Image (tube, rainbow, N blue to C red):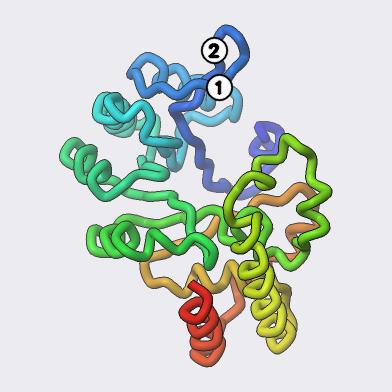
Amino acid sequence: MAEALDQATTHPYVFTKVSFVWDSKRKIRSTQKPESIRGEVKASLKRLHVDKIDLCQVHWPDPEDEIVEGWRTLAELKDEGVLRHIGVSNFSVEQMEKVGAIAPVETLQPPYSLVHPEVENEILPYAKKHHIGVIVYSPMASGLLSGTMTAERIRKMPSDDWRRREEQFREPRLSRNLALAKLLEEIGREHECSTAEVAIAWTLLNPAVTAAIVGARSPEQVDGFIGAADLKLSRSDFERISSFVQEHP
């Protein structure tokens, strides 16, 4: 990453997170103690060869009793000019209000997809009302709406793959989700785009959503979803998807 930034001809935005650290046994633990957060930010600056980070977010509100001191530390780092913007991930409305009393929450990163639309109820409306930028993650629901997931593929997943134990990857939810993916595939064909692009574009229809994060392990995977940025779903597309969700809650 540092090499790519060093060679960049234009300044890319640099985002990172804090609160997850390795312990002495090489296991990940969560902490929001001021000294830990300052150490994480300092290490990121050094690794990335930059003097400022454009956006730094708290990964999880865990431990919850440390979120206030953790947020206060990020606010201090912003005042010191080390961070340009600060935000949170996976926070509830109550947690955002608690830390927002110290310094404004500028961004929120919640999970959001047709499989997991729960944030529509309270969190997204709150973010929109308070002008919090929303960067959703897992818009393809960990691959369920990618267009490449099948029941057979799931059966062949390694025993340590967490998805094998997740409710949405097991019956009766699995059949419902694969049928939803089939509908997205049909809509995609009409737009000459992929199932994944339709799934991602659907999240971007929500007026509270600023952007969507999508992970890729190869250039080919990027080619399969990059078109979502330009895909404009029609009202008819939206209504077809909404009808399916209402009939198969």
Q: Is residue 150 above or below residue 162?
A: below
Give neighbour class at mark 2: few <14, some 14-19, many 20+ (Cα, 10 Å): few
Compare residues 161 and 60 and report the one nearer the observer. Answer: 161
**Amino acid type for the residue under numbered disc 2:** Asp
Please provide percent x and percent y for residue 92: 31, 47
- The reply to whether the C-beta atoms of the residues labelled 2 and 1 are less than 8 Å apart is yes
Please provide percent x and percent y for residue 230: 60, 75
Q: Is residue 113 above or below residue 73?
A: below
The number of numbered discs placed on residues in the rendered structure image is: 2
Q: Which residue is mark 2?
A: 23
Please provide percent x and percent y for residue 19: 44, 27
Q: Quadrant of the N terminus?
A: top right
Compare residues 181 and 75 and report the one nearer the observer. Answer: 181
Q: Residue furthest left?
A: 101
Compare residues 144 and 30 and report the one nearer the observer. Answer: 144
Q: Is residue 180 visible?
A: yes
Which numbered dot is residue 154?
none
Q: Residue furthest bottom?
A: 236
Q: Residue furthest front?
A: 172
Name the residue: 37% across, 14% down.
35
Q: Which residue is mark 1?
A: 28
Q: Is residue 227 visible?
A: no
Dot 1 falls on a residue whose secondary structure is strand
Give neighbour class at mark 1: few <14, some 14-19, many 20+ (Cα, 10 Å): few
**Amino acid type for the residue under numbered disc 1:** Ile
Q: Is residue 175 above or below residue 17?
A: below
Q: Earlier in the sequence, mark 2 or mark 1?
A: 2
Name the residue: 79% across, 40% down.
158
Dot 2 falls on a residue whose secondary structure is loop
Name the residue: 56% across, 82% down.
232
Answer left or right for 206 relative to 167: left
